[in-house]
Amino acid sequence: MTAAIFAAILIAIFIYWNVRLPFYRDRSDTALEGDEVKCFSPRCRSFKSESGSDRAVLFIHGFPTTPAMYEYPRSFFAEHGYDVYAPLIPTFGADWHDFEKTDFSQWYAFIENLFMDISKRHAKTFVVGVSMGGAMTLRLAEEHGESIAAIAVLSAPVTYNSLIRDRLITDPLAYFVRTVALFVPSIGAGTVDGKPDGEDGDEEWVGYKGVFPRQGLSLIWNLKRIRKNLGKVGVPMISIHDRNDRTVPFGNQKIILSGVGSTTVESLSPSMEPFRHSRHSLLMYYSTRSVYTEAIFEFFERF
């Protein structure tokens, strides 16, 4: 075997190991408990509004942000008679050193347990998720559809890099994230409590900055399962995704719409004005939050 052939085989194994993620599994099995005393901003904390309604809505935030992204819609739904829950997933919005030790399976288990508690206490439970929260919403519908009245998913990913199958690339560097994750827990990590140079409400963004290779890898791996099981989503669904989303490629919406088993599906595919922000957190921006909150509310009111 020549050196060139041997090198080619090694490269092929390296690419396969990073892209297909053989033998990867989330390793953490410790249940997460909220400790919001550590929150670096009051706006990171969970929101709950209970009035004894038989209708509840659960808002699931994205990666790596906080419930602050839902300040407008959570108040809107509370004012319109819903019990509202917008939890902070533990280690998000607190100490990013703790966040480095967790993974998607732990985050989802926390949300799943909370959802089960909420659904037992309400006749109808609705779920809204943006970005990673949208992916979690889809998984809840896949696994607990009998307990969900309807869902709204916004800017939701179900794949990360899928060049051959979908001609969709979120970040080429993610092809190497498994290798990087072996050695680097985070790059440029820190906290963000508002963006002074933001616009259109993006200045209100609260969460972590930087790159978290191990947590990103965990998310990418779990998206594979969520996409595979999309056909199990049978609940009414509204999907909203901006065509020029700079964080989660718009192609993800097509995959979701073609993959779910729901018979009642509505979708909105806006194209925002050319703001500097990522056009991703659609329920946070001043230009879109009221329009899409009301669209979701009107959709939920049908069920």
Image (tube, grey):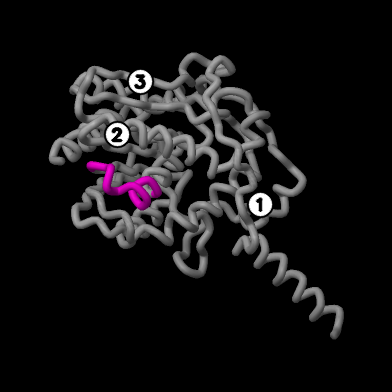
Circle 2 sits in a helix, a strand or a loop, which is it? helix
Q: Which mark is residue 177?
A: 1
Residue 88 can be seen in this image: yes
- Find the distance from the CA under tag 1 to the CA under tag 2: 39 Å
> Amino acid under label 3?
Lys
Image quadrant where one finds the N terminus? bottom right
**Which residue is farthest left?**
302
Q: Earlier in the sequence, mark 1 or mark 2?
A: 2
- The residue lying at 70 percent from left, 72 percent from top is 12
Which of these two is toward me, 109 or 87?
Answer: 109
Residue under label 3, please give it. Answer: 48
- Find the distance from the CA under tag 2 to the CA under tag 3: 16 Å
> Amino acid under label 1?
Val
* Quarter location, residue 11: bottom right
Q: Mark 2: few, some, or many residues within 10 Å (few <14, many ≥20)?
A: few
Instruction: Using residue 284 as the reference point, say whether residue 303 is left or right of it.
Output: left
Image quadrant where one finds the C terminus? top left
Residue under label 2, please give it. Answer: 120
**SS assignment for the magenta stretch, majority:** helix
- The residue lying at 35 percent from left, 26 percent from top is 85
The x, y position of residue 58, in whole percent, is 33, 32
- Look at the image and give the residue range highlighted in magenta: 139-149
The x, y position of residue 134, in whole percent, is 39, 43
- Find the distance from the CA under tag 3 to the CA under tag 1: 36 Å
The x, y position of residue 258, in whole percent, is 31, 62
Between tags 2 and 3, which lies in front? Answer: 2
Which of these two is toward me, 46 or 70?
Answer: 46
Instruction: Using residue 94 as the reference point, say whether residue 7 is left or right of it.
Output: right
